[in-house]
Amino acid sequence: MEWLLGPFEVAFVQRALWGGILVSLICALAGTWVVLRGMAFFGDAMSHGMLPGIALASLLGGNLLLGAAVSAAVMALGVSALSRTPRLSQDTSIGLLFVGMLSLGVIIVSRSQSFAVDLTGFLFGDVLAVRPSDLAYLAIALVAALAVSAVGYRPFVALAFDERKAHTLHMRPRVAHAALLGLLTLAIVASFHVVGTLLVFGLLIAPPAAMLPWARRIPMIMLGAGCLGTTATFFGLLLSWHLHTAAGATIAATAVLQFLISTVASALRDRRSQYARPASRLTPRTEMSS
């Protein structure tokens, strides 16, 4: 038990655990809609698109969270504006803005010789440096994410499965899409300083995707994703402590490993059910003939 619980007796590891749990719950709420709508590429682009705001805020001595929020908002508004262009698909718009924002961030970083050292922390985070104030901020972000998910649940469902039906039901899909982008922005901005702009994508996508084959209702996907994210945080921190690896990267890798295990298990389940169907169909006929 000492090997399992010993690391979490340390104060900064406890804060890292609580920070990771809060991030997992926030990402479970936003990530479920991202997975259902097939917006994984957009989530990845958003996490990279924050780099210019973070870099500029750091160079000017400003608030990094504010810089990340402004940069993410610009990215979201840009995608929404370009998506309305008839000749451009959404993937093309996201790809162009993704490259543009990332290039701008690298240009800003290249203007400072001292910023390159800090860039690793912004990209990969430092979950072991979570402060009590960070936990309070994450708790507020979780409450906001819960409120947006609850208020926008019906429009989000209609938008995820049939946008034309959302128009028919007067669900205002454009407003719902903007709210969904806001929820995604909130999750990424709230989480980047804990697990980094690159690794937040793992917690945003992997737990909901791992839960998708096992749950039929959206709230159950969210709940299961939150549990998987919490489990990935616990075991990621545990492995990081004993193996002396980067904590944020280990958490993200654990989340991806959960997804791979879920995919293999669901494939085996589906194969077993395919073999079981012919047998179940023959049983009633056999009983009738006898």
Image (cartoon, rainbow, N blue to C red):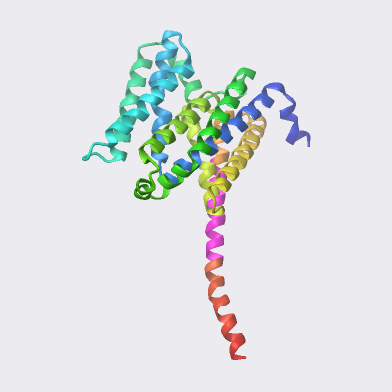
Give, as a single range, the part of the protein colored magenta: 256-272
At x 55%, y 67%, the residue is 273
Q: Is residue 108 above or below residue 218?
A: above
Locate residue 258, reporting x and y percent: 57, 45
234, above or below 134, in the image: below
Q: Residue 123, position in %: x, y?
A: 47, 25
Q: Quadrant of the C terminus?
A: bottom right
Residue at x-position 54% and y-position 33%: 147
Q: Main secondary structure of the magenta part?
A: helix
| 89 magenta-colored | no
Q: Quadrant of residue 87?
A: top left
Q: Is residue 21 visible?
A: yes
State which quarter of the image contains the N terminus: top right
Tell me if residue 267 is in the magenta stretch. yes
Which sits in the foreground, 104 or 176?
176
Q: Where on the picture, by quarter, is residue 180? A: top left
Residue 217 is situated, as x and y percent measured from the top left of the image, at: 54, 51
Residue at the outermost front position: 170
Task: Tell me where residue 234 appears, x and y as whole percent.
Answer: 65, 35
Give the image quarter of residue 175: top left
